[in-house]
Amino acid sequence: SIKGQYGKHFAVYDDKLRKKLLLEQAITDSMEDALEQGQFEVYLQPKYRIEDNTLSGAEALIRWKHPEFGMQAPGQFIPLFEKNGFITKLDQFVWDRACAMLQEWDQKGHHLPSISANVSRADIYNVELAEILTTLVKKYGLKPSRLHLEITESAYTEDPDQIIDTVSGLRDLGFIVEMDDFGSGYSSLNMLNQMPMDILKLDMKFIQIETAKPVHQGILRFIMGLARSMCLSVIAEGVETKEQLERLRQYGCDYVQGYYFAKPMPCDEFEALMCQSDKQSEIQEELPLLEE
Ligand code: C2E
Ligand code: MG
Ligand code: MG
Ligand code: MG
């Protein structure tokens, strides 16, 4: 009967919802301990300068090595942490690790210009944000410009006044701000012009659509031109193929990040990668001498 069918649907729905709530509760109950026990780990994904293929930085991305459920990607827990407020604490952990790595690698003589970290929309409303970040870079003896702050486009559109206030303050202090996921939401071109930022980070959907189609090429060219006229650098994320890379190069994109180069990796693997690229740039520097 119809009644029976509805009943069944409700039952299925209830069960799914119940499981979801139970899982959320389990995560919420364990997150504080997980942080203390070192279950959260910062992975790094390299960013390259397109002009000469040199390593220009890295993005810090959080991973949860859960003792029961295994390695968890951020999609599994960040939305919940944004709801329950824990993201503020977790982000501070990530920023701290990023600065610690920069200091350690400076001391070892590597040349990593910067690390970018994600700043959640919740952090934007934290009145202590500027102070926390300033204290942090001081603690590790770094210039603020070594830490790039990635703020998602939707946070910009949600509360432009708050963003202008917070981000202008951070930039005045010397931090570099990237608008993350540009093109995934609904920022108007008019608004873009008024928003404080240093770098435009193109959402991967722009890169991964059929870039061979003339209209998409037009859009990409247009964005690059717009960014240049606003004195912004452009980074493309989600670059997976050589073809995508070559098109971006052709259009004047400044930086690239994506699986074509490397996936996010643990810090020790990143260090090994950095050692290789240090060697490569030494070889490049020596080349003109050899030719003499
Ligand atoms: P995001 O900030 O846009 O980070 C880029 C995401 O794209 C990362 O996913 C990265 O692994 C993935 N990615 C990079 N290159 C490629 C590629 O070539 N192909 C594909 N398919 N994907 C690529 P991940 O690490 O799963 O992070 C997802 C999102 O979770 C991030 O998006 C960010 O919004 C959030 N997130 C990650 N770590 C943190 C954090 O420490 N704090 C906060 N607040 N959010 C974080
Ligand atoms: Mg990001
Ligand atoms: Mg992000
Ligand atoms: Mg992004």
Image (spheres, rainbow, N blue to C red):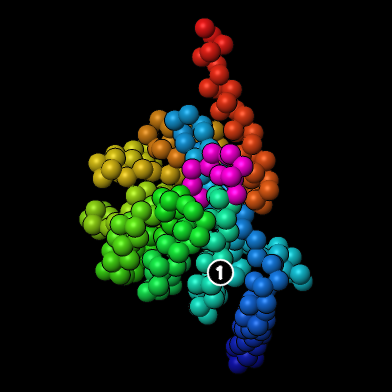
Q: Is residue 79 visible?
A: no
Does the magenta segment cover residue 152?
A: no
132 lies left or right of 264: left
Residue 181 position within the rendered picture, expressed as x and y whole percent measured from the top left: 43, 55
Residue 193 position within the rendered picture, expressed as x and y whole percent measured from the top left: 24, 53
Q: Quadrant of residue 1?
A: bottom right
- How crowded pointer 1 is (Cα within 10 Å; few <14, some 14-19, many 20+) is rated as some
Is label 1 within 8 A of ligand 1 (CB to nearest ligand atom)?
A: yes
Does the magenta segment cover residue 115?
A: yes
- Residue extending farthest to the top is 292
Q: Is residue 49 above or below residue 180?
A: above
- Residue extending farthest to the bottom is 3
Looking at this view, is 87 or 25 the one in front? 87
Residue drawn at point x = 45 percent, y = 40 percent: 255
Q: Is residue 65 above or below residue 222?
A: below
What is the magenta range? 104-116
Residue drawn at point x = 45 percent, y = 44 percent: 236
Q: Quadrant of residue 32?
A: bottom right
Residue 188 position within the rendered picture, expressed as x and y whole percent measured from the top left: 27, 57
Residue drawn at point x = 60 percent, y = 49 percent: 104
State the residue position of label 1.
90
Q: What amino acid is labelled 1 in the image?
A: Leu
Looking at this view, is 263 or 108 the one in front? 108
Looking at this view, is 16 or 23 the one in front? 23
Q: Is residue 165 visible?
A: yes
Residue drawn at point x = 49 percent, y = 53 percent: 141
Q: Is residue 161 above or below residue 262?
A: below
Residue 248 position within the rendered picture, expressed as x and y whole percent measured from the top left: 43, 36
Image mark count: 1
**Callout 1 secondary element:** helix
195 lies left or right of 72: left
